[in-house]
Image (spheres, grey):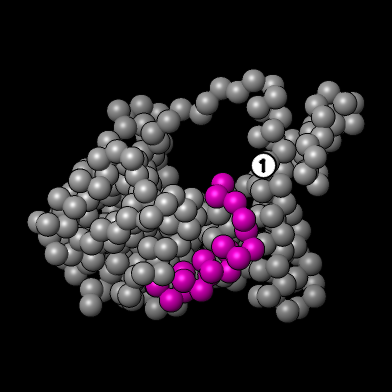
Amino acid sequence: MAKVTVGVPVYNGAEYLDKCLTCLRDQTYRDIEVLIFDNCSEDATSEIAQRFCAADSRFRYFRQPENLGPVANFAGVLEAAQAPFFMWRAADDTSDLDYIETLVALLLAHPERDLAVARVVASLPDGRGKRVYPVPRLLEKGGAAGRLVQIYQAHAPTWFYGLFRREAILSLLRKVVASYPYFWGWDDVTMFALTFDRKVIGTNATTFYQYLRFAPPKRDAVQRAKRDDEKLEMGRSLVAFAHRHVDQVITAPAERWFYHLVVAHFGHKRGYSFTKRLRRSLIRSTGLVPRRPNSQA
């Protein structure tokens, strides 16, 4: 059995999949298996994946009988993994060739941590819009200060593509899937629990490259209003999950009260801001945008 399973959930990823799989094939850490979970793609994804499988026994290809949605496909590849360490790799992302080797060494050196992460460079595939997100130096700080650093400074959803201890992320993801019914923000929900529990360790010695394939679409007023309502519901769900996690982890009443305030502010920053919520309420109260029938906002 391999020491590391890399899960590649993909749907219509033919444009970038070859580059992604080549990066995994050429990693300096060789003791890996790559599980490609195809969510019923309609392009050349299958042909590209099966070509890698035919050339390298570490690659295995699975095709869903129907499109299950991204969350189910992400969860499915994790459930299928058997190695002690696990990472997801989006079909349009890459990394330095020593990425897996560096993160494995980091988790082995820090048995108290469940996720190893690295510097992130995000850009469009042509290099435009480049942003660099280094791992903060204060990531390893202890106590309450360390927890706040992890939540605010170190909370990067892209770290979802770091290296996990499989058992830790498996139990957490099952909890997230059961209580958070959305795709948007589910990486934020998962990362909150890991950062709040100070389970993340990081390094700037290697880099993960995230490619942003699409510019944000322009929407008319009705589309924006609908999206705002959806984000309100998702933000509430994210914050509710975070509050429940605080209750499960913190026992002292004063400390629990403090972290519930932190969660409220975290939701303002990460879920949906207080000002936007107020704006939506005012718009509805004036009747400018009708309330959706199924909305509870």
Residue 151 seen in the current view = no
Assess whether residue 276 is covered by the magenta stretch. no
Q: Nearer the viewer, residue 241 or 120?
A: 241
Image position, residue 79 (x, y; %): 41, 69
Count of picture labels: 1
Is 96 positioned to the left or the right of 85 in the image? left
- The answer to which of 211 and 220 lies nearer the viewer is 220
Location of the C terminus (image quadrant): top right
x 68%, y 48%: residue: 235
The residue beneath circle 1 is 231
Which residue type does callout 1 highlight? Lys
> Horizontally, is 255 left or right of 164 in the view?
right
* 230 lies above or below 60: above
Local crowd size for mark 1, using a 10 Å CA cut-off: few (<14), some (14–19), many (≥20) = some
What is the x, y in percent for residue 119? Answer: 37, 50
Q: List x then y, in percent, for residue 121.
A: 36, 42
Relative vertical location of residue 203 with respect to residue 244 in this rendering, above or below:
above
The secondary structure that dominates the magenta segment is helix
Q: For the N terminus, give its image quadrant.
A: bottom left
Residue 225 visible: yes
Taking the spot 15% from the left edge, 50% from the top edge, the residue there is 51
SS of the residue under disc 1: helix
The quadrant in which residue 105 appears is bottom left
Range of magenta residues: 163-184
The answer to which quarter of the image holds residue 17 is top left
